[in-house]
Amino acid sequence: MAITEICTIIALKQLSPTHFDMILDAPKLSEMAKPGQFVSILCGHSRTLRRPISICDALEGTLRLVFEVRGEGTEYLSKRKVGDTLDVLGTLGCGTFPILDDDRPVLLIGGGIGAPPLLYTAKAQKAAHAVLGFRNEAAIVLKNDFYNACETLMIATDDGSFGAKGTIEAPARLLLSKNKYSAILACGPKPMLKAAQSLAEEFGIPCWLSMEERMGCGIGACLVCACKTKDENGEEKFSHVCKDGPVFPAEYMVW
Amino acid sequence: MNLSVNIAGVELKNPVVTASGTFGFGHEYNEFYDLSELGGIAVKGLTLKPRLGNPPPRIAETPMGILNSVGLQNPGIEKFIEEEIPFLRKFDTKIIANISGSTVEDYIAIAEIAGNSDVDLLELNISCPNVKAGGMAFGTCPKSVEDLVKKVRAVVNRPLIVKLSPNVTDITEIARAAESSGADALSLINTLLGMRIDIKTRRPILKNNMGGMSGRAVFPIAVRMINQVYRAVKLPLIGMGGVATGNDAIEMMLAGASAVAVGTACFTDPMAPVKVRDGIVDYLKANNIDDVNDLVGQVILHD
């Protein structure tokens, strides 16, 4: 079920050279939000396509969106002012991160702009540990939020300017060998998702991955945001990130 | 006030239908409004066998429009008949089955099956720019249009719409060929072949390199072609290409369309088809027009 809601911007601040943190007054959408879901926002009258943005948090009638400026649409969003309204379609995605009823924590693996949806996911779990990867120290976002939402937080940067140097793989492996986890939930660039999937296989735990693809309608009608998956019988097909996902069980992915 | 229009003997309760490929089989948009609000629904393009479609990315934004290269991903005609017709029949709206093939034999086979199913109209897609075999190749040469439409006509008892490609030198030639071979109506325009390149990677944004352009940017081209075709043939026309408002629909009807299809506008606003219909009503009221059919082809051309 999706609706459009006209939302007023309550707060907007810059988190890094390219990342912005926006809070919307969204009484209806915030009630509907599930971990891993996204909304799709109209970016002015001259753009045909809405921009899909993951839900970073949903709290007391508000939606928090942390997004990266990647092109004209997200630049438009970054230049709005507090008090402006946005036409927001949501909440979107039938494939969501599971909320696990398990005493073992989940391990969240996120990278870059894949980190924000994991915050809401972390808060929904009994307990969560997180490993987040960023390009460098300046690109780190939501460090304090994850620190508060997770029992353990490890950060890796590509250049070693903060935390472990390199990808999330080494710190994630360290946590996986020390602790027992119920699942790995991951969102980030494809190489990171593949790494999360192989770590889950190696340690014998289930894994869910949040996928990304260029979208059209956002609700499953136009079929543009295809991503290749296989079913139980190994038969390959194109699923659609907006409706079937964005979160898929890792074993269904075809890379 | 009369909003109903007649396309090849089928009465649509209002002149607004959805454009094939933008609306799936209606499930998603039915969450936003009752599909009975629509004059008709042109379903996602169907083929004889299920099709996977093209690899992603399948969409790129353009100034006031988009390119797509979905490549006719669909579950096949049989599954459509089993699962989707019963769903669509719950609504008081007409079903337009959009059908495609890779070969003449394919087209005949699917037309026969679709023609015997519980749909109201068939829309023969001879203008899809996103498939390697068939599609647009059939729709860009009058001879092949004639040959195909005749053969399909021979096996189909239902009203037959032929959907025209704008990627031709003279669309009236193609329209006449379709008319003389037995088409009952024409729909136009399908998408215009386009391309976009990422200047950082020097790669086309679409994995298929090229794709079909739609959205508001193509509207004037659609209006021009509809008017040319209106003056060239006697068949009713379903106009499409960039319709996003009631005023757009009025303009297209003045050019010669008996009905209009709303497509890409749904991505911007899921309510677009209903708003287009409401906009038509507003215009008729404001101008004291009792019958929407009185608009068709009423543009007064300069000498």
Image (cartoon, coloured by chain):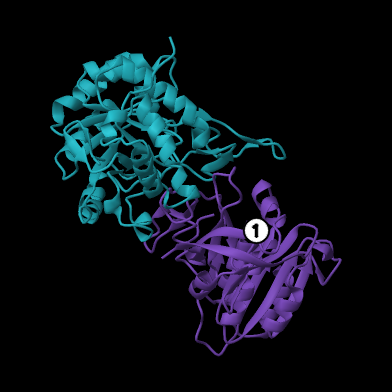
Q: Quadrant of the C terminus of chain B?
A: top left
Q: Please state if A78 lies on the left or on the right of B157 as rendered.
A: right
Which residue is at a point 38% across and 64% down the rendered structure image? Answer: A232
The answer for which chain carries disc 1 is A
- Identify the element where label 1 is drawn: loop
| Amino acid at pointer 1 | Pro
Q: Please state if B126 lies on the left or on the right of B303 as rendered.
A: left
Which residue is at a point 70% across and 51% down the rendered structure image? Answer: A75
Q: Quadrant of the N terminus of chain B?
A: top left
Residue lying furthest top: B303
Quadrant position of residue B48: top left
Quadrant position of residue B256: top left
Q: Position of residue A163 (x, y in %)?
A: 82, 72
Residue B141 in sight from this viewpoint: no
Mark 1 lies on residue: A189
Q: Position of residue A168 (x, y in %)?
A: 72, 68
Please tell me whether residue A54 is drawn above or below residue B3 in the rendered image. below
Q: Position of residue B85 (x, y in %)?
A: 22, 51
Residue lying furthest right: A161
Q: Nearer the viewer, residue A178 or A127?
A: A127
Please tell me whether residue B79 is drawn above or below residue A55 in the rendered image. above
Quadrant position of residue B169: top left
Q: Nearer the viewer, residue A9 or A58?
A: A9
Chain drawn cyan, letter?
Answer: B
Residue A28 in sight from this viewpoint: yes
Which residue is at a point 73% across and 81% down the rendered structure image? Answer: A147
Which residue is at a point 22% across and 24% down the rendered structure image? Answer: B183
Picture colour for chain A? purple
Structural crowding at the residue carrying mark 1, measured as other residues with C-alpha within 10 Å and reported as few (<14), some (14–19) or many (≥20): some
Q: Position of residue A202 (x, y in %)?
A: 59, 72
